Amino acid sequence: MALLEVRDLKTHFTTDDGVVKAVDGVSFSVEKGKTLAIVGESGSGKSVTCLTVMGLNPRRGVEISGEALFNGRDLIKLRGEELRKIRGDEMSMIFQDPMTSLNPVHTIGGQLREAVLVHEKVPKQQANARALEMLKAVGIPRAETRMDDYPHQFSGGMRQRVMIAMALINNPDLLIADEPTTALDVTTQAQIISLMTRLQRDFGSAIILITHDLGVVAETADEVMVMYAGRAVERADYKGLFYEPHHPYTWGLMDSMPTLSGEDTELTPIPGTPPSLLRPPEGCKFNPRCRFVMDICRTEEPELKEVPGSPAHLERCHLDEAVKQAEIERIATERLGAVS
Amino acid sequence: MIRYLIRRLLWAVVLFIAVTAVTYALFFIVPADPARIMAGKSASPAEVERVRKALGLDDPIYIQYAHFLKKLVIEGSLGTSYANRQEVNDIVKSAAPVTASLVFGGMIVWLLIAFPVGVYSALRPRSKTDRAAMVGVLIGISAHPVWIGLLLSYFFGYRWQVTPIQGYCEVFSPPPGQSQCAGFPIWQWAYHLILPWITIAVLYAAFYVRMIRSNTMETLNEDYVRTARAKGVKESTVLRSHVLRNAILPVVTMLGMDLALALGGAIFTEYVFGLPGLGKEAVDSIRRFDYPTTVGITVFATVVVITFNLLVDILYAYIDPRIRLS
């Protein structure tokens, strides 16, 4: 059985202007020790999906339905206190901006220790020892001397390492990383990603990696889910997604990703902007921005269905399989030429 | 940290010299002749001159200021009152505890109101309690302390007779024979100060409710609060250790400044309730053209304010590591 099994998850926010369907019927699963990448533009619902699983959405004006089975319990049905005991212990989360994610008035050691002490009755010394051990594991130089330092004495990359240490200190089954490298510079990004994959091997945690960086996905993911306007538009294992992408939005993401092949490939951005979730377009949510739009796309939203011949690959598009194959060819030669 | 303190301390000294110089000059620029007033209406010009010489008023003003500073720094003396030859130090010594009782007691009252109300409002924005609190804030900010003081003393003191209207009772060595202060000293002291405390607290409670509410709401949205929740920290601990710990930082700074402001605002309250505090003494001395007393009280108040600000700076450094360690 999967570690986390999410079925038909919906998170709707009631605002003064109407209902925002931030997450609208998303299903996915994460296997023990594996990595699921959730990809999509800002506002596609990837963060809200994970915050809902963690129970960290604001409490007012939210309507949540669906299931999220984690180690056999439905997280959506759990009461606040039960969910709190799971949070930080069996599953934990790190966030996009390490600069603001640590409390400025508590020491690094204190914040790490707190993560241990809320879940386990151990002496302070023992919690401290665990904190120090984790700081070393995430590669903080001279960790012994830095326990009593405050967050402002750390750089962004170092702070994200601290966040990772804090998230893994209780050896969780699941780590949710919400764009962990977006706020960091490129060399630091690579370090953080390799640190995460190394620690995943050591600790055996499953990871949900929220990102809009397909490069990061290629390096880390076992499974990929592409989200658009609160829905999954494509779900596949990493090979399926990169070598046989089936949705025009996924194609768009790939076309807007630079390659280092040196060939004369132009970057093609996806035209337009993500739709308003208050008044999403009729039919397929992507139709106003789609190069291949047909009449049916404007009236009827396609189902999430299996790709013929590969049952683990799901996609949500009306296009004819032949058209898709042609486009897959094109992307394979243009974008992935250097890879294959 | 040491450098921060030294910098603050130097600033305090500069501030002290600037404020005393300006105050001193200001009062002697006023077109009134203290020598003539002291000598009396029927005094001859020769007598006025003698008084002028005796008071040292014939020297140029910067010499007078130098004398004043010298006396202040070396002897610790604020000078002598023109009106009754009393040491200004003694006047301050008897009036300062009254004002201190009023302002600090008032501060405790306003913090006791503002913290629970502000935090509760922040946790339940747009609730009925929150809306009621915001209306209260508006009234508190709009109402003048004299009006509040008179209203309170009319209802509580006169109509319902539950509190005294006038006067002050000393805690230590209450003068014998004051029948209104008979009884346990601390109780009498507090009993006489209840209405003044409430009066002075209303305005500041209003300001602080609003400030604490908005600080708390802002801090609740901080990423590190979400981090704490993601760690599984109990909601009560999140509030105490992560939210309030950060939300009070600006409150501490404000407190230093507002204590200074309240010292000035205390004048109204002291007048309404007949408290012999610094504000009342200062106003009375201005009426009598008793410049040394006026200047003395101003200088004393300045020193107190500067000291407060220094203390707040130190306290701030203590609770905010970003200042302590940079």
Image (cartoon, coloured by chain):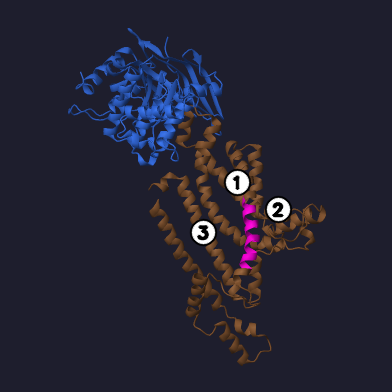
Chain colours: A blue, B brown
Q: Which residue is drawn at 58% across and 80% down?
A: B31
Q: Which residue is drawn at 58% across and 74% down?
A: B292
- In the image, what residue type sits under mark 3? Thr
- In the image, what residue type sits under mark 1? Val
Position in image of residue A241 (x %, y %)? 31, 17
In front of the other: label 2 or label 1?
A: 2
Q: Does the magenta stretch include residue A167?
A: no
Segment colored magenta: B91-107
Position in image of residue B55 (x %, y %)? 57, 82
Q: Mark 1 points at which residue?
A: B209
- In the image, what residue type sits under mark 2? Ile
Q: Name the residue under label 3.
A: B307
Which residue is at the front of the view, B167 or B118? Answer: B167
Mark 1 crowd level (few <14, some 14–19, many ≥20, 10 Å Cα): many
Q: Residue at x 57, y 43 (%)?
A: B213
Q: Is mark 3 on a helix, strand or loop?
A: helix
Position in image of residue A92 (x %, y %)? 43, 24
Q: Is the residue A94 above or below the residue B72 in the image? A: above
Subunit bearing disc 2: B
**Count of numbered circles on the image:** 3
The answer to whether one can see residue A184 in this image is: yes
Mark 1 vs mark 3, CA separation in Å: 26 Å
The answer to whether one can see residue A14 in this image is: no
Q: Is residue B96 magenta?
A: yes
Task: Tell me, yes or no, whether dots 1 and 3 are on the same chain.
Answer: yes
Subunit bearing disc 1: B
Mark 2 vs mark 1, CA separation in Å: 29 Å
Q: Name the residue under label 2.
A: B186
Subunit bearing disc 3: B
Position in image of residue A337 (x %, y %)? 20, 21
